[in-house]
Image (cartoon, rainbow, N blue to C red):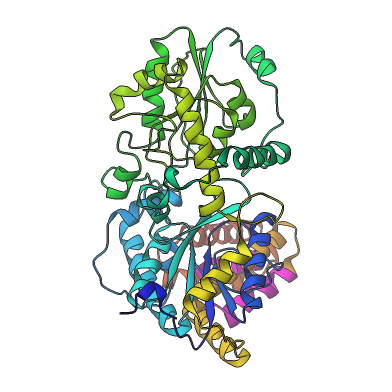
Amino acid sequence: MVKFEDSKIASVNKIVLMTNFRTMFPETISTLNLINDYVENLGLKLLLLSNTISSELKCTTVKIPFSMKEFSSLKEEEFNFPFNQNLISIDAEFNEDENPDVELYKAGLKKCFSAAHKIALTVKPAIALLWSATVPQSIIFKNVFTEYFIPTYFVERGLLPETLIFDESGNGACSSIKKKINLGFVPQNFEHIYEEIKAYYFTNKIDKHEQPDYLSSSDFLEQQNLAGKKIITFLGQWDVASGVNSTNDYQSFLNSPHFTNTEEAFKSIVKFISDNENIALVFKPHPFDSKTYNKENNTRIIVDKKLNVRTLIESADVVIVMSTTIQYEVLFYDKPIVLLANSFLNGLNVGYEIKNSEEIGSAIHQALNKKDYADKQINAEKFITLISSQILVSLNKKNPITTSLASFISHLSKKYFSNNIESVSKDLFDEIYHKTKNIFNGYLIKQQVQELILKAEELITGQNILEAKIILNDILQNLDPESIEVLNDLAVVELISGNFDTAQNLLNQILVKDPFNLVAKENINYISQVNLLNTEKV
């Protein structure tokens, strides 16, 4: 009997489909271009679906929505199917939407499901690589692609800089990778391998997020008046991206069974600090965390998103973490680490773990006293060695990670294809590209219209009235003849030009479509006042 994982997926199109939801930093572009190069070297073709696009990308790209809110603008039918309602709250949090229109999100979610089905049928990808296991769009695409037996991997930033991880099942506690980590399988010379990896990262000091200037620990402690105190450093996570986003969601509970979010964990640590006068807390929220944290006017508690993370780790006697990937770099610093959430380190006797929220004080005291710390240090070295040799995929040929991106893509090719792969037919690929783009055509037009409106409004502000008028008329004639926003802007152009009758006509058209449009009403009122003044002068 042939197992599914060993079978060769026959693919007419030989296309690798990938999604991307990261801002187009140079690092992102470089990574996507590397993947494209390795895919094309194998005779395959990369088709990228992304909400951000760069002219520097080598691969063929189709711009798509990111959130369910944006998906609601598609002209797709609303595919009725049972879904986890928490996907809406997760998506709203990704959008920082504090008052989400639930019906709008629900409509978008159904259209996203429908679009995913069409993509599976249109593209028929050989493999799908979906960015982030916690983005609702990725979750929906994964579920749909599974129905079509399309091998699908979630792609995330790796546990160490310059690496990626490719996971078949999910994030954090739901990850297939977590189940593969067994410290019993590390090489016998793991100490040597660990030191080589450690030396590389300390020499290169690669940061995942932009950092302020480094400050020595002694200078930092003096600057903050913390000399003589035991220092607890708490490195925050971005809850929604960590799969900790809804108290009612099972994934959230699995990833963080003791604290519903970073803020709750912070409050628990603050309570401990308040009761221990010889201990100070330095908390660095995640760069994408928009919450405001109350330190209760305690001078022994510092909350600052802009501190250098290496300064903070070096200054710490103990480091506390949840699911942030910086925790794996902390292991290089030989610092006791307290684990508050279910990360890849849990269950390996690497950090000080808790069984409930009440144990946080006990765990911190054990860490400060370095109870059984020698064993934890050895296990930390084994963990770094294991993930570097068996789990992570390297983006840089110079680093000591065993598996390169090229070899991993080649592994996928050998796993799912026969050895004799012919190059993708250009005509077939172009047809697939246009069919895929057509699925999102309405959304793309809407985005184009918004960009042109912004450009026209900038021209109006700069008194370039003629150019603005050309752009606005072009939108009405070729892209969106029903746009009220464009009609309002065009009415303003006519008012500035002194064409009051034309402006009045445009404003009347708006009020026929939207009788309560405030902008149109205000401009009509302005015309009435001008006409009244002119009458009085006569």
Please state which of residues 514 and 398 is positioned toward the viewer in this rendering: 398
**Magenta segment, prevailing SS (helix, strand or loop):** helix
In the depicted structure, whether residue 209 falls above or below residue 139 = above
Please state which of residues 6 and 433 is positioned toward the viewer in this rendering: 6
For the question of whether residue 504 can be seen, the reply is no
From the viewer's perspective, is 537 left or right of 241?
A: right
Please state which of residues 423 and 478 is positioned toward the viewer in this rendering: 423
**Residue 402 shown in magenta:** no
Which residue corresponds to the image point at 41% horizontal and 27% vertical from the top-left? Answer: 266
**Residue 473 shown in magenta:** yes
Residue 37, position as x, y percentages in the image = 67, 71
Q: Quadrant of residue 228?
A: top right
Residue 499, position as x, y percentages in the image = 66, 70
In the depicted structure, whether residue 158 falls above or below residue 77 = above
Residue 19, position as x, y percentages in the image = 52, 66
Which residue corresponds to the image point at 55% horizontal and 85% vertical from the top-left? Answer: 434
Q: Quadrant of residue 77?
A: bottom left
Q: How many marks?
A: 0
Q: Can you say which quadrant of the picture contains the N terminus? A: bottom left
Residue lying at the far front of the rendered structure: 188
Which stretch appears magenta?
Answer: 467-495
For the question of whether residue 82 can be seen, the reply is yes
Q: Quadrant of residue 409?
A: bottom right
Please state which of residues 15 and 76 is positioned toward the viewer in this rendering: 15
Q: Can you say which quadrant of the picture contains the C terminus? A: bottom right
In the depicted structure, whether residue 257 falls above or below residue 45 = above
From the viewer's perspective, is 157 left or right of 95?
A: right
Residue 358, position as x, y percentages in the image = 29, 23
